[in-house]
Amino acid sequence: MQSSFSGWGNGMLGVLIFSGSLPATRVAVGGFDPLFLTSVRAVVAAGLALILLVIFRQVRPERSEVFSLIVVALGVVVGFPLLTAMALTHITAAHSVVFTGLLPLSTALFGVLRGGERPSPAFWVFSVVGATAVVGFALSQSADVSLVGDLLMLGAIVVCGLGYAEGAMLTRRLGGWQVISWALVMALPVMAGLAIYAWPGQVAGLSVSIWISLGYVSVFSMLIGFVFWYRGLAAGGTAGVGQLQLLQPFISLLLAAFLLGEAVAPLMIATAVFVVLCVAGAKRFA
């Protein structure tokens, strides 16, 4: 019981942090090329991760764990940030909410394939219904459609689900912050080279909001959020805790309402309540 509570609590903290990722990325691509944004955020996060690994004298991963760390790095350090940054040059952050509603399903599927989890049939019913509700709500709020942007977001969801499931499996042996830290450090040489290659010609005139967004996706989205998220997935189960991502679009909209004064539609409240019930059902049968 305590492990389950810890898993869902840590998972919720991770979701809260990740909720600002797509809006912040949307702002950041207004000043940075997607390739540069992806690489420089990884470099910043890797620098912080390397400091943590040295300070706490972490033992290097075993050879058998290197492949899984590469999968994590390709999924959440390179794949998801790059594909979403590219997608957000074609679609709005609001439209990207459509696809975050599919992320819990992707995470659960890879949890079954890679982690050997076996949720009950009732779990899949709640999961599919919840994802359908989120996608339906998101589509009703956004008419912005781009085939290229949509395909890029679909690819991002697939690689992210794989990275989440693989990282959760490793976390049981290495620890949550260690997994993302080692994945960042392993990707550092490549990402540093890409950052130099894609370095923008002019950065002096960029707005403060762009720099703040870059800082957010580098420190919170790329490192701190994963500390809680991987710990949650490992303790509470990848398939079950992964359903918390269904709440992420609504948290993002609530943050927009609180910080930017945007209106909260009654449909959003009703859908959010329904999704909470789906998450509770998925938790019960995970």
Image (spheres, rainbow, N blue to C red):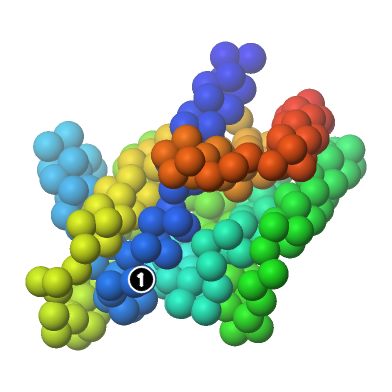
Few, some or many residues within 10 Å of mark 1 (<14, 14–19, 20+): many
Q: Quadrant of the N terminus?
A: top right
Q: Nearer the viewer, residue 123 or 277?
A: 277
Label 1 residue SS: loop
Question: Which residue lies at the image location 83% right of the left edge and 40% below the top edge?
Answer: 126
Question: Which residue lies at the image location 74% right of the left edge and 61% below the top edge?
Answer: 139
According to the image, label 1 marks what residue? 29
Q: Position of residue 32 (x, y in %)?
A: 28, 74
Q: Is residue 211 visible?
A: no
Type of amino acid at the residue the image marks with label 1:
Val
Q: Is residue 253 above or below residue 101?
A: above
Q: Quadrant of the C terminus?
A: top right
Residue 143: quadrant of the picture: bottom right
Tell me: 186 left or right of 145: left
Question: Which residue lies at the image location 27% right of the left edge and 61% below the top edge?
Answer: 210
Q: Position of residue 111 (x, y in %)?
A: 65, 50
Q: Is residue 285 visible?
A: yes
Q: Nearer the viewer, residue 112 or 101?
A: 101
Q: Position of residue 193 (x, y in %)?
A: 19, 79
Q: Position of residue 62 (x, y in %)?
A: 34, 52
**In this figure, what is the number of numbered marks?**
1
Tell me: 62 left or right of 75: left
Question: Which residue lies at the image location 58% right of the left edge and 19% below the top edge?
Answer: 5
Tell me: 255 left or right of 142: left
Q: Is residue 247 above or below residue 197?
A: above
